[in-house]
Image: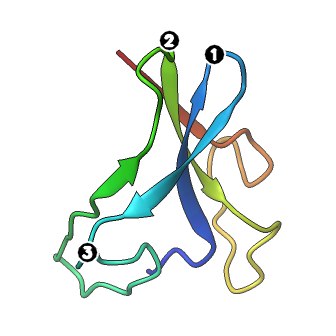
Amino acid sequence: MGERGTVAYLVDNLGKRYEAHAAAGTVPFDTILQPGTSTISKMRFDVPSAVGTLSLVYTHAHGFPIGWLIISEGGWFAQPAIMRLE
């Protein structure tokens, strides 16, 4: 299913947020794919070289997505997916 309202961004160890910029021709997160297919989305982040540890955050931008509900371990109200980058 297409993930409407989904965003990815970086955050540093001080909590400063760095927005993603999609590369030309990148397939948006809200594109619906056929079963068994996949795609790669390339994003660019402008981050100063002096920034220390970064983490990638993948979450919804604007509240509760009314179009669907996924029930899973952790549920909707859990923290967004955050991956520390080495």
Identify whether 12 is placed above or below 46.
above
Quarter of the figure that contains the N terminus = bottom left
Identify whether 54 is placed above or below 32.
above
Point out which mark residue 13 bears: 1
The location of residue 20, given as percent across then percent down, is 48, 54
Residue contact between numbered discs 2 and 1, judged by CB atoms under 8 Å: yes
Q: Amino acid at mark 1?
A: Asn
Residue at image x 67%, y 80%? 68
The location of residue 39, given as percent across then percent down, is 20, 70
Nearest to N terminus: mark 2 or mark 1: 1
Q: Is residue 15 left or right of residue 37?
A: right
How would you rate the neighbour count of disc 2 (Cα within 10 Å): few for under 14, some for 14-19, many for 20 or more? few
Which residue is the site of mark 3?
24
Q: For the residues marked 2 and 1, what is the alpha-carbon distance in whole angstroms?
A: 7 Å
How would you rate the neighbour count of disc 1 (Cα within 10 Å): few for under 14, some for 14-19, many for 20 or more? few
Q: For the residues marked 1 and 3, what is the alpha-carbon distance in whole angstroms?
A: 29 Å
Residue at image x 29%, y 84%? 33
Point out which mark residue 46 bears: none
